[in-house]
Amino acid sequence: MMIRHLALMFLLAGGPAFAGVEEAVEDHVLPRMANFAVQAGDLADAAADDCTADALRPPFQDLFDAWLGVSHLRFGPLEEGGRALSIGFWPDTRGMVGDTVARLIAEEDPVLEDPDAFAEVSIAGRGLFALERLLFEPELADYDDGDYECRLVQAIAEDLAMTSDALLSEWRTDQAPALLSAGDPGNTLYLSAREPAQVLYTALTTGLGFTAEQRLGRPLGTFERPRPERAEARRSGRPLRNVALSLEALRELARALADGPIPETEQAFAAALEQAATLDPVFAGVSDPSGRLKVEILQQRIERIQVAVTEEIGVPLGISQGFNAADGD
């Protein structure tokens, strides 16, 4: 009853109840989308100059860092046309990335010669995880300038740059204005002032859930059968880095959305990041009982963040988690 009463009060209060939407859009979403576009452009430029794996690993890491800053925003432009999966197809439960990359190379598929045609290639053959295979798998990464693998790397990098530019443009011209004018006449995307807060809050909570259940849960496997090889971006040494960067981005979003002080949420994020700092970079320790316990503790601390976020952000704003595209992963 209390939660429903609070929700009604804030809905009746109108716009000020959702003041955090402007902060989230202006201080979190747009700067991070811009950074993602910059890093993707830098990678494409670097690949055009020198496509070798040694040359592209640093800009690849920078782009993946930027992706962790926006990957939780799975609504609007990132949701359209399966863009999120075309950038980061993970978890890949059937090994489709490896199979698709291998097929493209074996057939020397000429589709990569046309950027528009390449944009129609299976999402398993595009994006960060296909690129990771080419740059970090020893049997694939030893290619030379002019080889098919080189041209495939360039095509993937260019595709990522085109996608990131489209995302940023659509956020700036369509999505951000729609979020900030929710409920106004003519706004067909967000019909009420409540909806933007709802969709951003859902991005926050599902982002936390994805990190706990997938980024940590998949390598944990079961006690009898831990699966460190299932960790996200293990070939490039990123599993722990991805968790930490995701938590930092989600903390920023939580701060923007908050309608007041959030001491429990701040403490919970700090505790989770402190625990993350004790883990090995690729979660190899899940095969050892003591190492596994450290990862399970981090999972529990992320669950505490979720509880704190609900109490300190969701309840005061009168909103709750809704459906998100990542729920089906």
Image: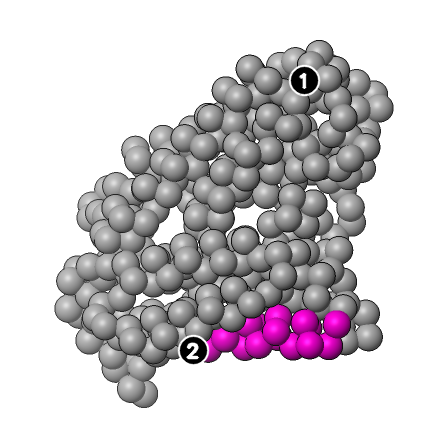
Residue 263 in percent (x, y) is at 29, 76
Q: Residue at x 75, y 72 (%)?
A: 288
Residue 306 is drawn in which quadrant? bottom left
* Dominant secondary structure, magenta: helix
Instruction: Label 1, secondary structure: give it.
Output: helix
On the image, the x and y values in percent for residue 90 come to: 64, 49
Q: Is residue 82 visible?
A: no
Residue located 55% across and 15% down the image: 49
Left or right, 54 with respect to 160, comes to right
Q: Secondary structure at mark 2?
A: helix
Residue at 43 percent of width and 48 percent of height: 69
Q: To which residue does mark 2 refer?
A: 307
Side (left or right) of 304 relative to 154: left
Residue 43 at x, y = what percent?
A: 52, 27
Q: Earlier in the sequence, mark 1 or mark 2?
A: 1
Give the numbered dot on residue 217. Answer: none
Q: Is residue 303 magenta?
A: yes
Residue denoted by label 1: 151
State the quadrant of the C terminus. Answer: bottom right
- At a point 66% along the width and 56% down the height, the residue shown is 282
Amino acid type, mark 1 = Arg
Which colour style is shown?
one colour
